[in-house]
Image (tube, helix red, strand yellow):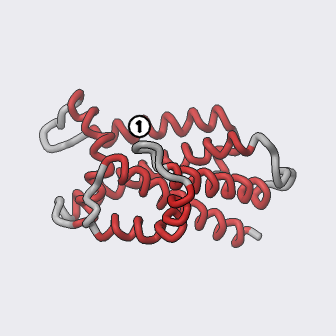
Amino acid sequence: MIALFFLGKTILTFSLYILILRLWMQRIRVNFYNPYTQFIVRITQPIIGPLRRIIPSIGKFDTATWIILYIVALIKLIFVLYIGTINAPIWSISYLFFAFAVIAHEVGYLLFWLLLFRAILSWVSRGQSIADELLSQLTEPLVAPIRRIVPPIGIIDISFMIVVFVLIFLNMLGIDAFGNLWLIL
């Protein structure tokens, strides 16, 4: 049962990451000729494409992708609560609200991993790879405002550490607000 829980949770988490990345890449208009960007679009297109024909976007708001993201978050919540805990009901009306907490949880963790990978790649590739370009485009909207306030000290850029500190603080607020639910997500 633990192996099933791990496998299901991992698949649902990566599905959420891919959907969040698609929305984030559309919002900040990353280079869509990047192979990683094309991978994200191609892997989500079989699900989102047909839904877009039924539910069109509202201005810049990609309604179809948001609906799929919400549904996958709801499925992950039900899966984690039903498989991961003993006394959780399979359905409760409160799950509709808690699905937003799942999305917030996954956005925070995805941003953390993107910042970590960007920092590691900056030591190795020094901006020479297509992955580094994409990571830079994805994380720069978060790091740039802090960098304007706190400029780099010599060659050390502490803006990444400040963003990670804020993410850790928000994670602790999530633990305070949602308790064990936040921890098992």
Image height of 166 relative to 7, above or below:
above
- Disc 1 packing (10 Å; few <14; some 14–19; many ≥20): few
Q: Is residue 173 left or right of residue 30?
A: right
Rendered image quadrant of residue 182: top right
Residue farthest top in this picture? 149
Q: Is residue 32 left or right of residue 111?
A: left
32, 118: nearer the viewer: 32
Residue 145: x %, y % from top left: 27, 33
Q: Residue at x 71, y 56 (%)?
A: 80
Q: Residue at x 64, y 32 (%)?
A: 176
Task: Check disc 1 and give the amino acid type.
Answer: Phe
Q: Residue at x 49, y 65 (%)?
A: 49
25, 62: nearer the viewer: 62
Q: Is residue 175 left or right of residue 154?
A: right
Residue 148: x %, y % from top left: 21, 31
Q: Residue at x 28, y 59 (%)?
A: 134
Q: What residue sits right under mark 1 in the picture?
A: 165
Task: Give the structural element (helix, strand or loop) at label 1.
Answer: helix
Q: Is residue 128 left or right of residue 183?
A: left
141, 45: nearer the viewer: 45
Residue farthest left in this picture? 154
Number of numbered discs visible in the structure rendering: 1
Residue 109: x %, y % from top left: 49, 50
